[in-house]
Amino acid sequence: LVRARGWYARALQCRAAGDGPGTLAATRAGLRILDEHGWAMGATDLRVHAAAHRADLAALGLETALATGRAAAQLEFSERARASRLPATPVRPPDDPVLTELLARLRAVTRELAERPGARLLARQAALERRIRDRSRHVTGGSAGAADRPASARALGSALGEWGLVEYTRSNVITVVDGRIRVRPLGAIGDLVDRITFAATRLDRPATAALLKDAAARLDARLLGPLPEVRGRPLVVVPTGPLHSLPWSLLPSCAGRPVTVAPSATLWLHAHARAAGGGPVVAVAGPRLTAAAPEAEAVAALHGGTALTGAAATVEATLAAFGTAGLVHLAAHGRLSADNPLFSDIALADGPLVVYDVERLPRVPHTLVLAACASGRPVVRTGDELMGLGVAFLARGAAQLIAPVLPVPDLSTRPLMIAFHRGLAAGRAPAAALADAALRHPEAAGFVCIGAGFR
């Protein structure tokens, strides 16, 4: 950390002397040191917290790049300023029988809490979560590797084809279309994202429907209206801040349009290059949802796969499916834990499947569908570092994920998901299949495609 602050001081010295290239070189050196420092830690929460030390260097680099007017440097430092821990090769914790036992005990306590809530059980749950967190922090990390090499416009242009990439920073929007980079200022979005997410969960009320329509139109005009080069093109969107929680299909210009979201352009490029591999389709239904089992059975039938329902839909069986399947569909209750994102979970027959379970997997499917409330919504930390259930699958190596960023109604979700899987079975790319399904079933708005999107 002292070495990195030294490079920050050197960068400030270069800026004061009017040496733009020297400023950028010093910020790169400082960020490289911090990436090595962060990736030496195996625990996700420690790496994310360590990434906060990057904020000053990344902000100075982006500010300097913007001042130079060089679009390539602006794209580079926009990438360096976000999701730094995700593009590198994931580190799988070693098999740990103590951690396995603690996770099993946590599931048992959670089941008891569902049946008979009480202060004693809540205290046991908190103690177990603390022990799981502390145990995971003893895992050794790896190398920053690809995190030190942001995607170039040339590589992005080659991979994007007819698609357009739109990347947002706090004050600017960067587009890459046909290999060309353009940078424009971003207008203030205020609380429009909050208005949309509020209204989208209350569509049964006429007043909120009007609020949603107005807020979506205004936000669309500010985010995509000033970008004529991406009109009519499918989109790869790299959000910032509250835009990570935006259901993009609700924007008027995105209705019926294939859109995939990525934490960074670099991560999207890696996901796009990931081979599909083989494996069956497995659909899993969690408890206490009327439509979950019929949904899982319908999805499995469409693909000639397997459905795990009722008592068979355990955490162990689901984790085993992740190890062999090419596509897994989960229809279950989901919960985002804002205070402890690594305990965000999906409810299964014998208790919750949490992020710590996902991080211990040797393999995850190429494509996942999480039909579970807010399972695609991340907790955003300093530097657009992301934590949550959906992000955990991407970090483990999933190429693409379809999940909601909002609470979604059980009965309305089923027809949307069946329509989506019909599109997949017919050979449609995930982002296109989701766009078509959402256009026909707007009552279940809230799902986004995250990752590669058109593989």
Image (cartoon, rainbow, N blue to C red):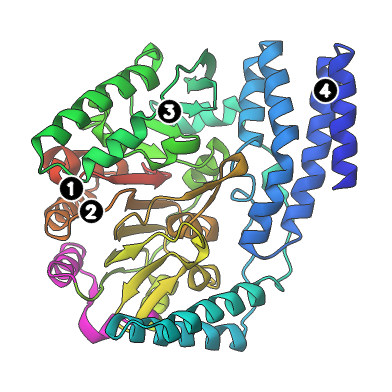
Q: Is residue 311 magenta?
A: yes
Three-letter amino acid code at the position of disc 4? Thr
Q: From what the image shows, is residue 396 above or below residue 32?
A: below
Distance, label 3 to label 1, CA atoms, is 30 Å
Residue 327 occupies which quadrant of the picture? bottom left
Say whether disc 4 or disc 2 marks the residue closer to the N-terminus.
4
Task: Compare residues 363 and 345 and report the one nearer the observer.
Answer: 345
According to the picture, the residue beneath numbered tag 4 turns out to be: 23
Question: Alpha carbon of mark 2 to alpha carbon of mark 3: how far?
Answer: 33 Å
Q: CA distance from mark 4 to mark 2?
A: 47 Å
Image location of residue 225, percent across then percent down: 34, 15
Residue numbers of the magenta segment? 289-315
Q: CA distance from mark 3 to mark 4?
A: 34 Å
Task: Check disc 3 and report the residue beneath it.
Answer: 161
Q: Residues within 10 Å of mark 2 (few under 14, many from 20)?
A: many
Q: Are marks 3 and 1 in contact (CB under 8 Å)?
A: no
Residue type pointed to by label 1: Ala
Q: Badge 2 is on which residue?
A: 408
Mark 1: secondary structure? helix
**Pointer 1: what residue?**
444
Separation of residues labelled 1 and 2 (CA atoms): 6 Å
Q: Residue at x 68, y 60 (%)?
A: 46
The one of 358 and 281 positioned closer to us in this rendering: 358
Q: Is residue 63 visible?
A: yes
Query: Decide: marks 3, 4 in contact (CB < 8 A)?
Result: no
Mark 3 and mark 4 lie on one chain; the one further toward the N terminus is: 4
- Helix or strand or loop: what does disc 2 sit on? loop
Mark 1 or mark 2: whose residue is earlier in sequence: 2
Crowd around label 1: few <14 · some 14–19 · many ≥20 (10 Å): many
Residue at coordinates 74% horizontally, 48% vertically from top-left? 35
